[in-house]
Image (cartoon, grey):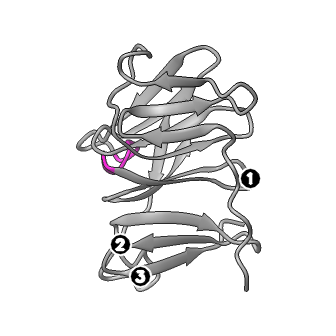
Amino acid sequence: MSAPPRREMPGWRHTPQGVDFIDRKTGKVTHHNTATVKGWPDDKTWTVVISKDSRIYLGHVDAGFSVYDPSSGKIRNYRHVAGDGSSLPGNEVRALLVDRQGNVWVGTTRGPALFDDKGGRFTSFRHSGNDSSSLVSDNIYHIYQTRDGRIWISTENGGVSITDPR
C-alpha cells in the first residue's frame, strides 16, 4: 500500500525562533513568535499544521499545544493540568494531525489525544500493560492518516499503533 502525498502547508514553517509565514508570491516572511504575538507561549516548536479554515495548530517543545488564528492574531494555549483528565496529556507535543474529518490529533510524550476545539478539552488515549488493544507506548513521535482512513501512531520503544476512527 502506498502512502498518500503529504498535504502541503502553503507558506507555514516552524523554526527555532517560532513560526514563519512565507508569502510565495512576494517572498515576504512574517514571523510569529513571543516577540510578535501577545500570548505566544514559547518559540520552540516540534510541529505545525494548518486546518482547512486556516487555523494554525502548534506543538511546542515544552509549552504544550496552541491554536493560532493569524487573521485575528489571537492564540489559545493548552497545557497539561495534573488531575484533570480532559487536559492535554503532556506538555511536549511532537506530532499533530488534522484528519480528513477535521479531527485534531495531538501526540505528546505522555500519549495522544483528540482535541475538542469547541470545548477546549482533550480525550486522551494511553498504553495499558493489562490491555493488549491499547497503545503500544505513550511516547508519540508521529501521527499519520492512510488513504483508507486509518490513523497510524508511531511511538518510541513500542512501534506503531493503528486505529480506525470511522
What residue is pinned by disc 3? 159
CA distance for labels 3 and 1: 25 Å
Examine the rendering and report whether any part of residue 117 can be seen: no
Secondary-structure class at tag 3: strand
Instruction: Say which residue label 2 marks.
Output: 127
Location of mark 1 (residue): 101
Indicate the quadrant where residue 37 lies.
Answer: top left
Magenta-colored span: 85-92
At horizontal 63% and vertical 32% (from top left) the residue drawn is 55
Q: Is residue 144 above or below residue 157?
A: above
State the image coordinates of residue 39 (x, y, percent, origin top left): 38, 18
Q: Of callouts 2 and 3, which one flags the residue occurring earlier in the amino acid sequence?
A: 2
Discs 3/1, front: 3
SS label for mark 1: loop
Secondary structure under the numbered disc 2 in the rendered image: loop
Q: Residue furthest left?
A: 82
Against 131, residue 145 (above or below) is above
Q: Give coordinates of residue 27: x percent, y percent.
A: 66, 28
Q: Quadrant of residue 59?
A: top left
Main SS of residues in magenta: loop
Q: Nearer the viewer, mark 2 or mark 3?
A: 3
The amino acid pointed to by label 1 is: Gln
Mark 2: which amino acid?
His
Image coordinates for residue 98, horizontal then vertical, percent: 63, 50
Q: CA distance from mark 1 to mark 2?
A: 25 Å
Q: CA distance from mark 2 to mark 3?
A: 12 Å
